[in-house]
Amino acid sequence: MMNNLNNNPNRILITGGAGFIGSALSRYIIDEKKDDILIVDKLTYAGNLESLQPISANNRYGFEQADICDKDVIDKIFTDFKPNIIIHLAAESHVDRSIDSPSDFINTNIIGTYTLLECFRKLYFNLPEEERANGRYVFHHVSTDEVYGDLEDDISLFTEDTKYSPSSPYSASKASSDHLVRAWNRTFKIPIVVTNCSNNYGPYHFPEKLIPLVILSALSGKDLPIYGEGDQIRDWLYVDDHARALYKVATAGRIGETYNIGGHNEKKNIDVVHKICEILDTIKKREDGKSYKEQIIFVKDRPGHDRRYAIDAKKIHKDLNWLPEETFETGILKTIEWYLANKDSWCKNILDGSYKLERLGI
């Protein structure tokens, strides 16, 4: 447990901070800001302390291995650390896994969020009234654009007012947690903000997701499976851009508001895979001289697969002056170069575990 707060302006507790987005956010805060952070992570298959190694020696960083569903443990962590900002990222997040094992998603994403809300409510209302009134206290719930379901045309965008229509056990569990957070704000008057983001990609991404799976499978000579015809459309957000947005919302977002965070990069899945193959063809040629595209195969589509997601991020730009810095072209090149540089270290250690680039959610 970290004890020295150094009188910094914020004490930020990040759940799921050893995961993909959480570790990017943690590295950003330590490298670019002056706040203290405490990471709470259960260290399931997707949590990896190696992703936090670049900041692990910093005296503004702390880590607690804990399950967010364990109320007694979480309550003690809140009491000891006394965070004024909670950024809640801990979640089961892979749609395919939610098809195989929905109970894990119900437990972590719904019960875990409820537990955190109750611990924060206790912390918040035990504060002196003047401190509540004048300090920046907020529970920032990080969610997904998948709660909205899919878009039926190629023009519409998800806004903060789009009706919820989740399609998978994963998105249903996240929609449920969103509703809990807003209900605790309305009923109990705790300060909250909610963000819904589009598909993230970048370094340190667990390789069950499309982009790292394609990169590592291509380099390993494995098939590159495309669901259906690969015409599903996603808006891609570089993870470091998302980290900047999350910090901005947590520290400056209007209490009670929702902000959609998107990368302004809509791509068909098949086009994403083609782009990865084309870059690898240039910077890491196959030994036989053929294109990585020859490894592409088309497989049966995922049950309930949404066709298109696209975020309207005008509100966060207008209110908080946030825009993504990376285009898909610059971000995907950085991502591929990182996986090439870390194939025999971070990536090798990940693949030495239980996950072997196999398909899930059949």
Image: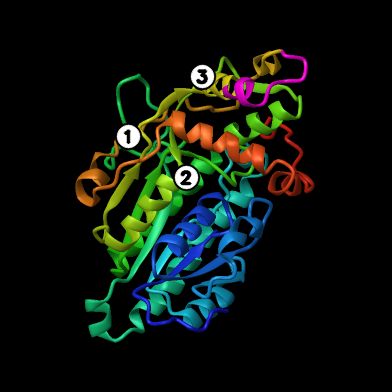
Find the distance from the CA under tag 3 to the CA under tag 2.
20 Å
Q: Is residue 145 above or below residue 47?
A: above
Write the start and end of the magenta stretch as one range. Answer: 279-289
Q: Which residue is mark 3?
A: 271
- The location of residue 87, given as percent across then percent down, is 43, 61
Q: Nearer the viewer, residue 93 or 39?
A: 39
Amino acid type at image mark 2: Val
- Is the residue marked by circle 3 packed among few (<14), some (14-19), or many (20+) residues within 10 Å? some
Question: Which residue does the image show at 40% across and 79% down from the upper left?
Answer: 123
Amino acid type at image mark 1: Phe
- Sequence-earlier tag: 3 or 1: 1
Residue 301 seen from this side: no
Question: Which residue does the image show at 67% across and 56% down from the upper left?
Answer: 44
Amino acid type at image mark 3: Asp
Q: Is residue 205 left or right of residue 248?
A: right
Question: Which residue does the image show at 65% across and 57% down from the upper left?
Answer: 50
Q: Nearer the viewer, residue 294 or 191?
A: 294
- Is the residue marked by circle 2 packed among few (<14), some (14-19), or many (20+) residues within 10 Å? many
- The location of residue 89, given as percent across then percent down, is 49, 56
- Sequence-earlier tag: 1 or 2: 1
Q: Nearer the viewer, residue 190 or 21?
A: 21
- Sequence-earlier tag: 3 or 2: 2
Judge whether residue 133 is colored magenta: no
Judge whether residue 283 is colored magenta: yes
Q: Nearer the viewer, mark 1 or mark 2?
A: 2
Question: Which residue does the image show at 54% across and 67% down from the upper left?
Answer: 39
Residue at the extreme left: 318
Q: Which residue is mark 2?
A: 239
Q: Which residue is mark 1?
A: 158
